[in-house]
Image: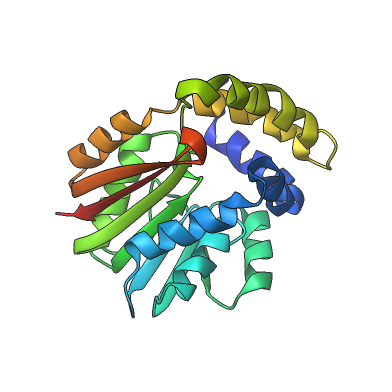
Amino acid sequence: MTLAPDAVRTMFDRIAPVYDVMNRVMTAGLDVRWRRLAAESAVRMGDTVLDAACGTGDLAIADLKAGAGKVTGLDFSEAMLARARRKAPLDWVQGDLLALPFADATFDAATVGFGVRNVADLELALAELRRVLRPGGRLAILEITQARGALRPFFSLWFDRVVPALGKLLPGGSAYAYLPESVKRFPDAETLARMLRDAGFAEVRFRLLAGSIVALHTGTAE
C-alpha cells in the first residue's frame, strides 16, 4: 500500500491527537531514549539545527536539550505542528521535506525521526537534507527498519497485528494499519546507508536498536 503525499498528510493530521500515545505504546517508552541518542549523535553545542518531519516536536526538543543554539522543526502536517507549538517555543515551520524552504548550507546539523519512511521520493529527501547542511554538517536519521535475527517473528507479529489493533482503539488510530506496509517497502539499514553515501554524506554509520527493529543512521555532509 503506497499513499500519495496528500493522503499521507491527511493521515498524519488525523492521527495527531494520538501520535504521542501510540509512540509510547508501540515502543514501550523507548522512543524517548532513541530520540535522545539521535540528537546527541548529531548536535553540538550552539548548533543551528533542522528537525525535518518533526511531527509533534519530541526530537526537535531533544535537539535543544542536546545543546543546539537554535532549532527549526518542519512538518507538512499542520495538526502535528499545532501540538508541537504547545510543547516548546521553537521555530515551527509548515513545509515539505522534498522541497525544504531554506537556503543552501543553512544548518550545522539535521535530524529526522520516523519521517523519511513516509516520503514519496527518498533520494530527493536525502538530497534536500544534504543541500541545507553546511559542509561538515551532521545528519541523524532514526527510523524503523526491517527486523532481523531471532526476534524477527515477534516484531512481525507486533507490527502486523498488535499495533494496528491497538490503533483502532484510539480516535484516528486506524491509520496505523499503514505502518507495517510502510516498513516492508522501506530500504534495509545497509541500503539506506548506501543511499546516504550516494547523496553526498561521508562517515556514514548505522546502529541497530531494540533488537534490530530501529536503526540510527549518521553521516557528515561532504
Residue 171 location (% of width, % of height): 84, 43
- Colouring used for the render: rainbow
Q: Is 81 displayed left or right of 118 in the figure?
A: right
Front-lying residue, 8 or 166: 166
- Number of marks: 0
Give the quarter of the image for residue 40: bottom left
Residue at position x 54%, y 57% in the image? 33
Position of residue 98 relative to residue 149, above or below, is below
Residue 122 location (% of width, % of height): 37, 36
Position of residue 192 relative to residue 221, above or below, is above
Give the quarter of the image for residue 123: top left
Front-lying residue, 152 or 9: 152
Front-lying residue, 37 or 201: 37
Split into 4 quadrants, where in the image is the C terminus? bottom left
Q: Is 49 displayed left or right of 152 in the figure?
A: left
Residue 44 location (% of width, % of height): 31, 72
Which residue is outermost to the front? Answer: 150
Q: Is residue 55 among the parts visible in the rendering?
A: yes
Residue at position x 67%, y 39% in the image? 11
Q: Is residue 213 among the parts visible in the rendering?
A: no
Q: Is 19 displayed left or right of 138 in the figure?
A: right
Front-lying residue, 45 or 60: 45
Split into 4 quadrants, where in the image is the N terminus? top right
Residue 89 location (% of width, % of height): 58, 78
Residue at position x 38%, y 28% in the image? 188
